[in-house]
Amino acid sequence: MKVALQITCVNDAMFPDTGKAVVRLLRRLGVDVEFPRAQTCCGQPMVNTGYLDEAVPVVRTFVDAFAGYDAIVTPSGSCAGSARHQHSIVAERSGDPALVAAVAQIAPRTYELSEFLVDVLGVTDVGAYFPHRVTYHPTCHSLRMLGVGDRPLRLLEQVRGIELVDLPHDTECCGFGGTFAVKNADTSIAMGADKARHVRDTGAEVLVAGDNSCLMHIGGVLSRQRAGVRVMHLAEVLVATEDSEGDSSGPAVGARKAGA
Amino acid sequence: MSGTFVGMPAFPTAARAALGDTQLRRNLAHATHTIRDKRARVVAEVEDWEELRLAGAGVKEAALRDLATHLETLEAALTRAGATVHWARDAEEACAIVAAIAKRHGADEVVKVKSMATQEIGLNEALEAVGIAAWETDLAELIVQLGEDLPSHILVPAIHRNRAEVREIFRRRMGAVGRPAPDDLTDEPAVLAGAAREHLREKFLRAKVGVSGANFAVADTGTLVVVESEGNGRMCLTLPEVLVSVVGIEKVVATWSDLDPMLRLLPRSSTGERMNPYTSTWSGVTPGDGPQEVHVVLLDNGRTRALADDVGRQALRCIRCSACLNVCPVYERVGGHAYGSVYPGPIGAILNPLLRGVSDEQTASLPYASSLCGACFEVCPVRIDIPSVLVDQRAAVVDAHRGDRIPRRGSHWQEAVAMRAAAWTFSDARRLGWAERASGLAGRVLGRFSRTTLPGGRAAAGRLPGPGAAWTGARDLPAPPPESFREWWDRTDGGRS
Ligand code: SF4
């Protein structure tokens, strides 16, 4: 099986550690994931802001980059949702039958990380060790657009040492919403403040989710509040082992400066 | 008597004001969560809820597909049953028809059943302008009307008010327009409802003309249907001599049996009840029983415009249950007024632009009043894919300004430039690589000057100027890492070296 990593533009530029975690995790599970260099972004920022024409060349780049792979894994429910549910809209708009056909081929092969682990690889115990109090926020697109259901929780439940606590009102939106976060910043922050309050109520040390963009928002609010809660992508928890726990790529340890 | 939404600012501005209203925030959070939970409980009882939703969507979709035929069937059946059918292209025509009927009967007042269509066309204000008082008889509408307020919810228009506020409104305003509130009025719900009942009773008994909308219009039998909880509707539909119903053309269903799924879906979705207390149905005139003159005004007012929109037309399936409002995280925090329309919340964010177009700034701001979380689609009893229509309407807003000679004001122009720049960057991995190197460089600088460390140890970017301030005003932002994933992969051969 030829497997490609779709890193997503946000992770590529802002959260490379998540990408590294996915690569290490998949290798540990016997999947030699490739990183097609021609990839850029799924086009969602443009589509969801209404710039459909602008999204056409981006979707074209996407299908060109991932042609020929059996599975495309992405550590983002939102970007997987964009590929599976929005690329066809953009392709129709382009009026290019070749693009429509290419999207129809590639969209169903795009998997969010937890779907790939549970459905394609058939694993829930990935051999992780993470001795921390953790709560999990199901992001809206993974929950409602993709329907990943309890897959991420099933993966987390198998992690050794973890203390997993329920997040109150977990299915309520955190208020990120892409460009909504800046176009309607006040409402976005009001929503984020409530989400942060629910997270703090759990007493968790780490908030985990499958989308770094939502985590950047909730984490940004928590950090501004000096709440003492860090946010981590699901992949970074699942990649942790007894050997890595405590080294520089491990969680919640010391001053890891931007350059480290 | 009540105000209008004319001149409302665009959503972000209106929302900012609403977010600062502490009592509104508390009232709304409490009310929406209560109805939300109630709905969830009674929906969970229905084993075949998903099939029921599909059936409901199917009934409405079938009616819309052949709308012209069904409307003609409806008109013929209504006429046979003794009703007079009027066609109104827009609000102005509809209001003029109702006013003319009332005038012909020398009425200086009408009693009203709660109706979204008559609010949409501003009927009360139009009647007032020609000297006819329109009395709202639904309890929540009465509160809004007496308070000279605007509705903020489809089903519970006074959802933004708590009982202490309602008591104040009754005490201060009832006397001016009819029977005053009793001196010993408390804020007990039963006492407040009792005062409203006394106040309304004399209006029911006196009025010559009743005005209603309809939840459904059955084409083959010529039957109008009103679904309600309080019984005030039945009073208005049966006591006056003359009844005028303003009905949006999308309310039509083909057959009587089509009501089956609809009447099961609606109460559970709207009030969270298994069944609503009152369902009134009537077909034209029944001699010696009820109104002896029955008029039906079939209203377009933008509906054919919405029907012509391939993606958006599904919004015409809406049965105004308001489930989407109650689960919406945006509505829950800003309330209904911020949407500047009698149709607030997720459905309002798509319906207003579909009915009116997106040429004005206020309407154009509505499709963006959503985080696209999808909670609305999940609960909608007729399966309107609101998030997809929102995205499609955003495209309509952007497309409306392609080729503008004079760029739109401020942030719109910046946004268009940013989106085009992003599209250019994302169309070629090499360009993205350059952008990432620049961001890595910026990250190094920002990281060095950072005075904030994020939990976990990463440096924060500090406060950004310009559009970035909308983010960093209330949220820390990590400084970009010095090395992108792409650069790491190249440097380490994907972590192998
Ligand atoms: S859009 Fe759906 S959920 Fe919202 S009011 Fe209409 S029918 Fe109800």
Image (cartoon, rainbow, N blue to C red):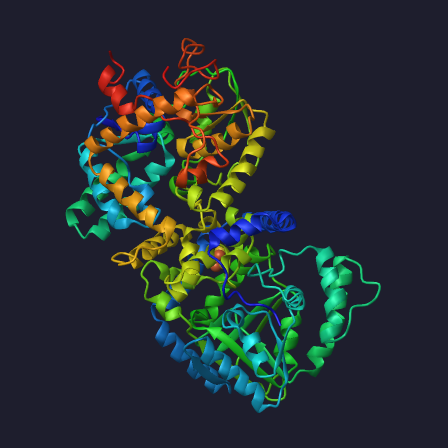
- Residue A54 visible at all: yes
Residue B450: x and y, percent? Answer: 44, 23
**Which quadrant of the figure has residue B163?**
bottom right
Q: Front-most of A234 and A246? A: A246
Q: Residue at x 56, y 38 (%)?
A: A194
Residue at 58% across / 34% down in the picture?
Answer: A197
Q: Nearer the viewer, residue A134 or B426?
A: B426
Is A211 in front, or is B276?
A211
> Along the horizontal axis of the image, is A252 left or right of A56?
right
Q: Which residue is at the far right?
A: B184
The quarter of the image holding the C terminus of chain A is: top left
- Give coordinates of residue B436: x percent, y percent: 28, 28
Vertically, is B87 above or below B167?
below
Q: Is residue B148 left or right of residue A241?
A: right
Q: Position of residue A207 (x, y in %)?
A: 50, 27
Left or right: residue B451 versus residue A48 is: right
In this view of the protein, which residue sits in the foreground, B390 or B227? Answer: B390
Q: Quadrant of the N terminus of chain A?
A: top left
Q: Give the answer, above or below, for where B155 lies relative to A143.
A: below
How many numbered marks appear?
A: 0
- In the rendered image, residue B45, in percent from the top left (x then y), is placed at 56, 49
